Amino acid sequence: MTEDNSRSLSRQRFGKYAQSYITSKPHAEGADLDSFIKIAQPQPDWIVLDVATGGGHTALKFAPYVKKVIATDLTPNMLEAARKFIIGKGMKNVEFKLADAEALPFEDDKFDLVTCRIAPHHFMDCAGFVQECARVLKQGGLLLVQDHVLPDDMDVDQYMEVFEKLRDPSHNRAYTEDEWREMFQDAGLMVTHTEQLTKKLQFTSWVERQDCAPEVVQALILIMKLASGATAEWMQARDIGTPGATFLSHHIIIAGRKC
């Protein structure tokens, strides 16, 4: 898929399902949002950039702590949904701007903190995204990212990528921790924090969030049933084929400071 086609698909899908990401519990809730605050230690004079803001939950989390947050997204409908959500929460120090994560429309050395949460797996050029974030950070500024993470086991890696792309064709690729570290280091960012965490996802709400067709849902159920060995251990799917079905989603949080 070309970069233009990938961006078009992301706009189409996330424009259509924007509201579901406002209410999505895995995006709106979780100790990982609190971890973002603990890791970043935001200051009252900071200007923060939230890339691919989605439902706006990260921008909303930081807004009370800083001077200003600029929330960006590639998808107009998603950005508008985030704007309504955040303004509805009474926040007045958040600005909203359409922007491509891989070509940020900001000058160099502008932000104290750049955040991006549960989005980079959609980017065609994730290394380019990290480079752009480093460019717009002030000297000493921090890039803080959370996203899906893959194990070093290539069989599990490939199995999970098939699973994710079937459910959401705009999914491009997730990365291992080592790959994330390399992208940060290549961009001149000194990695200061990494951690991995899991989220137990409800299968039904996960497929409903992308309005998966019945045949896609059945294929995803089959993928969970056929998982074995290290893949089954990674997924930890439970109650497969029932309304209470769950599986684990693995994430990384990584922070790097501009040297």
Image: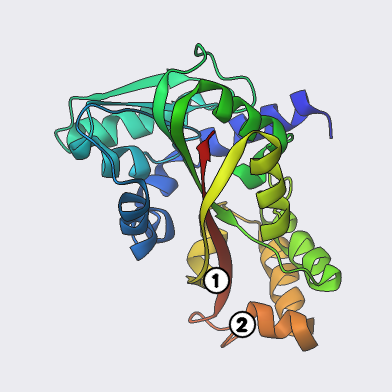
Q: Residues within 10 Å of mark 2 (few under 14, many from 20)?
A: many
User: Of marks 1 and 2, which one's residue comes earlier in the chain?
Assistant: 1
Label 2 sits on residue: 237
Label 1 sits on residue: 203
Q: Are marks 1 and 2 in contact (CB under 8 Å)?
A: yes
Number of the label disc, if any, that sits on residue 111: none
User: In the picture, residue 53 is in which quadrant?
Assistant: top left
Residue 191 image point, x, y percent: 56, 49
Identity, as a three-letter code, of the amino acid under mark 1: Phe
Q: Is residue 172 visible?
A: yes
Q: Is residue 244 above or below residue 74?
A: below
Identity, as a three-letter code, of the amino acid under mark 2: Ala
Figure label count: 2
Q: Please, what secondary structure does the residue beneath circle 2 have?
A: loop
Residue at 50 percent of width and 42 percent of height: 17
Taking depth in this image into account, of 87 and 251 the one nearest to the observer is: 251
Residue 123 image point, x, y percent: 67, 37
Q: Indicate left or right for 207 with 174 as reference.
A: left
Q: Quadrant of the C terminus?
A: top right
Residue at 58 percent of width and 67 percent of height: 250
Q: Is residue 176 visible?
A: no
Taking depth in this image into account, of 123 and 1 the one nearest to the observer is: 123
Residue 74 image point, x, y percent: 55, 26
Q: Is residue 151 above or below residue 12?
A: below
Taking depth in this image into account, of 214 and 100 the one nearest to the observer is: 100
Q: Quadrant of the N terminus?
A: top right
